[in-house]
Amino acid sequence: MDVREFNYLFYRDWNNTGGLITPSTAAKLLGLSTGRISQIWEERKLRKYIYTDPSKPLLSLNDIKKIQEEKYKNLSSEAQNIIDKEQREWEDNYEQILKKEAEERAKYGDLEPPRTYEDQIGEEIEEYRKYINKRIGKSK
């Protein structure tokens, strides 16, 4: 397969499937092992997209989204409401973290931002705990 053929097939399938992802990415999105992803693909007889290397298939992102939606729809409406609320709160908090990181990158570039006093103390405590744990249980 030459580059032109690969490009044609990849983009054609990308557009038809909502994107193509690796089995390991699918596993991360679903919180499953890659072995379980392979089982699901066999059980559901879903298509694997193979272009050059059969050991490196790609999977449809739309198929993964459908599996996520099925899991969600099997929850009670009360559970869905709680999950939705928690997800919105988590997303808001995470966006704040990302915003802070972006501000630090803009301010410091590739340099490490200065460590806060709390970080320094936390690291000292963690190092001491590691030291104590190494000493516990060792015979003399």
Image (cartoon, rainbow, N blue to C red):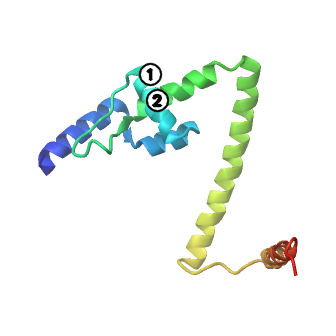
Pick the residue in front: 94 or 7: 7
Counting from the top left corner in percent of width and height, residue 85 is at 74, 33
Counting from the top left corner in percent of width and height, residue 35 is at 48, 38
Circles 2 and 1: CB atoms closer than 8 Å:
yes
> Label 2 amino acid?
Gln
Pick the residue in front: 5 or 78: 5
Mark 2 lies on a secondary structure that is helix
Residue at 37% across, 36% down: 59
Q: Residue furthest front?
A: 140
Counting from the top left corner in percent of width and height, residue 28 is at 54, 43
Q: Quadrant of the N terminus?
A: top left
> Label 1 amino acid?
Glu
Crowdedness near tag 2: few (<14), some (14–19) or many (≥20) residues, C-alpha within 10 Å:
few
Counting from the top left corner in percent of width and height, residue 25 is at 47, 44
> Where, by quadrant of the figure, is residue 109 drawn?
bottom right
Residue at 85% across, 77% down: 135
Left or right, residue 66 beside residue 133? left
Mark 1 lies on a secondary structure that is helix
Against 11, residue 134 (above or below) is below
Residue at 85% across, 73% down: 129
Q: Quadrant of the C terminus?
A: bottom right
Instruction: Give the residue at mark 2.
Output: 39
Left or right, residue 113 beside residue 70? right
Instruction: Give the residue at mark 1.
Output: 43
Against 5, residue 124 (above or below) is below
In the image, which disc is placed on residue 54? none
Residue at 69% across, 38% down: 87
> Where, by quadrant of the figure, is residue 72 drawn?
top right
Against 23, residue 115 (above or below) is below
Crowdedness near tag 1: few (<14), some (14–19) or many (≥20) residues, C-alpha within 10 Å:
few
As measured in the structure, the alpha-carbon distance from the residue carrying label 2 to the one carrying label 1 is: 6 Å
Against 114, residue 98 (above or below) is above
